[in-house]
Amino acid sequence: MSADVSNAQALRAAFTAPMQEEIARFVASVEEDRHLLDADLRGSLAHVAMLEACGILTAEQAARLRQGLEQIRAEGLELDPAYEDVHMNVERRLEELVGEDARLLHTARSRNDQVALDLRLYVRDCENRLRKALDELTTALVDKAEAYADVVLPGYTHLQRAQPVSLAHVLLAYHAALGRDRERLRQPLISPLGAGALAGTAIPIDPHRTAQELGADGVFSNALDAVTDRDFAVAFVFASALLAVHLSQLAETLILWCSQEFNFIRLPDELTTGSSLMPQKKNPDCLELVRGRAGQCIGELVNLLTTLKGLPTGYNRDLQETKPPVIRVSATVLASVKVCTLAVQHMTVHREVMRQAASDEKLYATDLVEQLVSQGVPFRTAYATIGNLVRRGVAFSQVAADEWATLGLRVMPETLTPEQSIAGRASHGGTSPGRIADQIAAARATRREDVP
């Protein structure tokens, strides 16, 4: 590092000694701030526009600053740890490009409100990227559900076969959960610029104009809150961690389904790995990592909350540590969404294997209970009647007609099939073909409404 910049002298005008180099390295945040460069430049461009509109900058000064900031944005900027963070690196480069006018950029602004804005803009960008990726995954789920709407398989509780359902029913269940995740990734962008360090500023600025330039949804109401709280970051990491949990559950289902024990689906070679010893192995490693990395995302949420829990009001340098969890979670979850999308798009469905598994007569026990109920038998009596047959190990198809009549069942069940079973599940949100068609249509309509 050169001696003239090694301790970011621009921030130490009141100090009599330079910062020790080890301390300078310790407090620097350039590794994380590389991700915030574009957000920082966008914030500065909006700030310049506001300063010009308020008459604090001349048109010529604003034009020079704008030109310099746009040049940095176009060329990129390698951040120097000697300048601590992205803000001072940008200001240093801007001074190289436009000279003394660069010193006007920080008018009526603190790094406290500046970094709060940068992180908010970065979170908004991450939300948009994740929402776009989720659009592809949810579309893949609906496409697959529609293509295989006639495929039946066992539905499971406690990982035990429970009732026949359609494959579409399972895929649309994940679609519903991921749709809620997508909505959680849509929080308002509140501009903190104008809050200053904590108390506002005596310079006659217009924070509403800055927010307008940024395309923000609103302006801070209290300057101290604007620079202190990182609840927006917590909300994003929470939403991302919950999304990671849902992706983990989807991955686990696909992992089970492509195992030899289930053999419901096959993943293509392009999405699997081999074994260093066993040549027959084809492993769903990418899905296992989706499952494993969900734990990292949960850990980042705890990390972030723990950092914030003991802070007094006002900016504290601990807040610097709120950036890494946001950056890491965003990258992890985005990659996991893309992996799950590929798996859903390219999996091969073994429809006959699924149907065979759904043809186990015991899966019709609930159908028989409900047939008895529909013929006037009290539910608990019907439940006990069919449960007695299950306990005796009697196959339903082997029960004599007169015994069914004795039990009170006028319709003989020996013709039951998985398709007949699911056809009866016509209640709201059920697995009958009609209800599945409704859910697919609703999913398509929601997607069309959400496309800008």
Image (spheres, grey):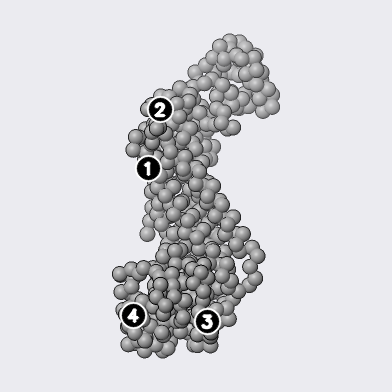
Q: Using the image, determine if residue 184 lies above or below residue 68.
A: above
Front residue of 188 and 427 = 188
Rounded to the nearest angstrom, the CA distance separating label 2 from label 3 is 64 Å
Q: Residue at x 54, y 14 (%)?
A: 397
Disc on the earlier residue, 2 or 4: 4
Indicate the amino acid at tag 3. Ala
Q: Which mark is residue 278?
A: 2
Q: Which residue is mark 4?
A: 96
Quadrant position of the N terminus in the picture: bottom left
Q: Residue at x 57, y 67 (%)?
A: 318
What x and y, as percent, mark residue 366?
59, 26
Disc on the earlier residue, 3 or 4: 3
Quadrant position of the C terminus in the picture: bottom left
Mark 4 is surrounded, within 10 Å at the Cα level, by few (under 14), some (14 to 19) or many (20 or more) other residues, namely few
338 left or right, relative to 236: left
Foreground: disc 3 or disc 4: 3
Mark 1 is surrounded, within 10 Å at the Cα level, by few (under 14), some (14 to 19) or many (20 or more) other residues, namely some
Q: Does the residue at mark 1 contact the one at mark 2 (Cβ under 8 Å)?
A: no
Rounded to the nearest angstrom, the CA distance separating label 3 from label 1 is 57 Å
Q: Which residue is mark 3?
A: 17
Secondary-structure class at tag 3: loop
Secondary-structure class at tag 2: loop
Residue 385 visible in the snapshot: yes
Rounded to the nearest angstrom, the CA distance separating label 1 from label 2 is 26 Å
Q: Which residue is mark 1?
A: 342
Indicate the amino acid at tag 2. Met
Secondary-structure class at tag 1: helix
